[in-house]
Amino acid sequence: MYISTLLTLFLLANAAPTQADMLGVGFLKRATKHAHKVAIKQSATLARDLRTTFASVLIQDATSPSMQNVYCVGSAGNVTIPSPVSNSTGPSNSGKPSGSGNGTSTGTTGNSTSASSPWKVVQSYSGQNFFNGWSFYTDADPTNGNVQYVDQSTASSNGLLEVNSQGHAVMRVETTPKVSNNRMSVRITTNETFTQGLVVMDSVHMPTGCATWPAFWTNGPNWPAGGEIDIVEGVNNYTNNQATIHTNPGCTVPSSLNMTGTSVGGTNCAAAETNNQGCGVRSNQGNSFGSTFNNNSGGVYAMLWTNAGVSVYFFPRGSVPSDITKGAPQPQGWGEPMADWPASGCNPSTFFYDHSAIFDTTLCGDWAGTAWSSTGVPGQSTSCAQQTGYSTCEAFVQNSGASFSEAYHPDWEVASVKIYQTQS
Ligand SMILES: *[C@@H]1O[C@H](CO)[C@@H](O)[C@H](O)[C@H]1NC(C)=O
Ligand SMILES: *[C@@H]1O[C@H](CO)[C@@H](O)[C@H](O)[C@H]1NC(C)=O
Ligand SMILES: *[C@@H]1O[C@H](CO)[C@@H](O)[C@H](O)[C@H]1NC(C)=O
Ligand SMILES: *[C@@H]1O[C@H](CO)[C@@H](O)[C@H](O)[C@H]1NC(C)=O
Ligand SMILES: *[C@@H]1O[C@H](CO)[C@@H](O)[C@H](O)[C@H]1NC(C)=O
Ligand SMILES: *[C@@H]1O[C@H](CO)[C@@H](O)[C@H](O)[C@H]1NC(C)=O
Ligand SMILES: *[C@@H]1O[C@H](CO)[C@@H](O)[C@H](O)[C@H]1NC(C)=O
Ligand SMILES: *[C@@H]1O[C@H](CO)[C@@H](O)[C@H](O)[C@H]1NC(C)=O
């Protein structure tokens, strides 16, 4: 049922009236409420969230073999990357960390000198100054989650934001035992933007458990014109990451891809032509998300965006390539990516530009909430309704603050975010 609700919502927000009329279904009060929000605040962010919703709906609904295997997973092959454009003898951190101030390096200390990586750090966020260079989003959650995003000082004074003794940036959700409506949470966006590059995010922990919906993603302006790349995303007890792109019309994925993940959804990534489903890929690595990611002390996600296309890699802790820990990444040695959207179907210069990186954690809302009673996605063999005894996600969130403290750790704990570019 929620599928038609969300379709209605989407059409009201984005489609010509004739299309909305064509739907011809009565929709729920909730949909009406959401549609109102859509009408009063249509924005790139909102549109993004609707797309995420459709991607998730497709996953929830992807019970038929035909939907689960839209693509063949291609045979192993080489990842194309640009040729080195300099001999790069300087320390990789010598690039001015734009907008990050004087970040203190953590975690990935090691040898920062490389003669072979063309990649130079252009933005670096880590240590005591991690949060310098990010803007705190304080509008209502466009995904209709039970959170109120708060500014930096509110987050800090409520214990939702810190750099811990390991030098890791921590972003938390409020754990007050009972709330009447929303829990405070944090959503941050880099002030600086980038076009093409390599984003490397090292996290030791991410939010997990019923009601949670964390994401790390990049987004361009004038959605969907600037494109969106969801690097880390999932809900509830999921243990396998989903990476997704959302674009203007004209971006597709080929039928055969060299990647380790499994496509979910369609081959047309255009938001306007596909009800925003996007081109999603689910990781086959069982420690790529949620509790299993956390049990393994997390790992490193890398998003590579070059003329060859866009791809996402995941390296569990213990399997992070030394070139990454040394700050001299060499993607050509990383093997097949988890997700790949090659240039042959989607020109990465046309469909993506001026991206910011974003972290957020919402609760319930359009994905975690609608999937509350669902099972079947890796990690979710028992529904959250059954596990918690609450029939709705909202009731669980409002009444079970303790669930959001020690037990389920709805925290992002991030060692670093580094954005590299080749010299031009
Ligand atoms: C996958 O790799 C093979 C072998 O390297 C190559 O021929 C093919 O073009 C690649 N396919 C895609 C979609 O990149
Ligand atoms: C892949 O790369 C390796 C090492 O660079 C090379 O030997 C091999 O020929 C390449 N394969 C293809 C299909 O390009
Ligand atoms: C590497 O770059 C340095 C500084 O730009 C230059 O002096 C040196 O000749 C270069 N080495 C090679 C092998 O190109
Ligand atoms: C960088 O930050 C450290 C610690 O906050 C400080 O001691 C150091 O002087 C700073 N360096 C620069 C160049 O600002
Ligand atoms: C760093 O790399 C350089 C060049 O490969 C090497 O000479 C040096 O010993 C390395 N230093 C450390 C601390 O690994
Ligand atoms: C980032 O932007 C916010 C406003 O959105 C501003 O308050 C902050 O000072 C900026 N940070 C830097 C390092 O420019
Ligand atoms: C799923 O989430 C529930 C509620 O947050 C939690 O009690 C349970 O331990 C989680 N299951 C797993 C396997 O992590
Ligand atoms: C994580 O580790 C804990 C403690 O070892 C274990 O109880 C739990 O089942 C693990 N969760 C998953 C999802 O592997």
Image (cartoon, grey):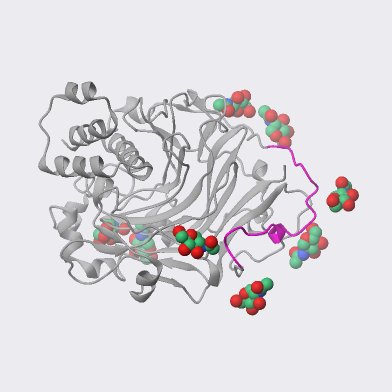
Give x and y (percent) for residue 232.
Answer: 43, 49
**Start and end of the magenta stretch?**
82-101
Q: Main secondary structure of the magenta part?
A: loop
Q: Is residue 27 left or right of residue 369?
A: left
Which quarter of the frame holds ligand 8?
A: bottom left
Q: Residue at x 41, y 25 (%)?
A: 268
Q: Quadrant of residue 20?
A: top left
Give x and y (percent) for residue 18.
Answer: 22, 21
Q: Nearer the viewer, residue 373 or 415?
A: 415
The residue most toward the front is: 40
Q: Residue at x 64, y 44 (%)?
A: 331
Q: Is residue 85 left or right of residue 272?
A: right
- Indicate whether 100 appears above or below 119: below
Q: Is residue 227 left or right of residue 266?
A: right
Query: Is residue 168 in the magenta section?
Result: no
Give x and y (percent) for residue 256.
Answer: 50, 25
Q: Is residue 108 visible?
A: yes
- Indicate whether 158 appears above or below 312: below
Give x and y (percent) for residue 109.
Answer: 65, 66
